[in-house]
Amino acid sequence: MPQQRRAQLTRRAILAAAAEEFDTTGYDGTTLNAVLRRSGITKGAFYFHFPSKEAVAEELVAHYRQRLAGLRHRWSTPGDDALSVATGLTAELAAELERDVMTRAGMWLAHRRPEEVDAWRRSLAELLTSAVHGRLLRADADPAATARVVHAALLGACAMSVEGLADHVAEIWRVVLAGAKPARM
């Protein structure tokens, strides 16, 4: 059992070090040597756990997808209005990105793939479409365009600084919704 625990800790150290490197220097700028230096792991130990830098990146993307799926599941409570789900989900994702470098690195790695970006935007657009149907947004609001704007603003805020990201996401929604919510009667 101690050997298995040590292997888990080594694997976790590699993933955490790679996430830190990907987060600060990007995928292309990250070298295996930098990951090894940051983790304190030998090259042999690295290759025992992962065949390549790409495999580490894949695992970080899987970590991000798992976190995102968990958030979506938590926010899929029947009876909740779609707009509250969209804003709450993105706010909680922002808080997760602020505190967890593995999720953040996984997000950046996932967003290098157009299909990942499309899936994220489509999911948000579906919620916003439901919000239009529920009259929580103006009838002429464009859910797909709104999803693209929110998504781009979230990524932009994350690229500038993850510090205070949850506050930035709240501000993004305030500005976007100011133009998309129906006028009060």
Image (cartoon, rainbow, N blue to C red):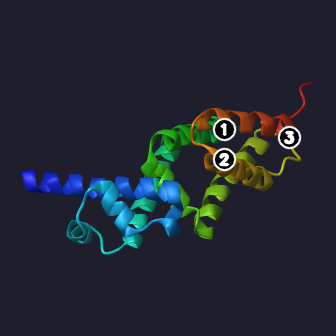
Mark 3 to mark 1: distance in Å?
21 Å
Q: Identify the residue under disc 2.
A: 154
Q: In which quarter of the image is residue 164?
A: top right
167, 66: nearer the viewer: 167
Instruction: Classify mark 2: residues with Cα within 10 Å, few (<14), some (14-19) or many (20+).
Output: many
Amino acid type at circle 3 is Arg
Which residue appears at 51% of the width and 59% of the height? 25
Identity of the amino acid at label 1?
Answer: Val
First in residue order: circle 2 vs circle 3: 3
From the top left corner, tell me how far across and down residue 184 is, in percent.
Answer: 89, 26
Tell me the quadrant of the picture where the C terminus can be found: top right
User: Where does residue 69 sit, x and y in percent of width and height?
Assistant: 48, 51
Task: Report if the CB atoms under discs 2 and 3 are less than 8 Å apart.
Answer: no
Residue at the outermost bottom position: 51
Give me the disc on residue 138.
3
Secondary element type, mark 2: helix
104 lies left or right of 180: left
On screen, residue 176 versus residue 85, left or right, reads: right
Residue 149: x percent and y percent? 76, 51
Residue kind at label 2, given as amino acid type:
Leu
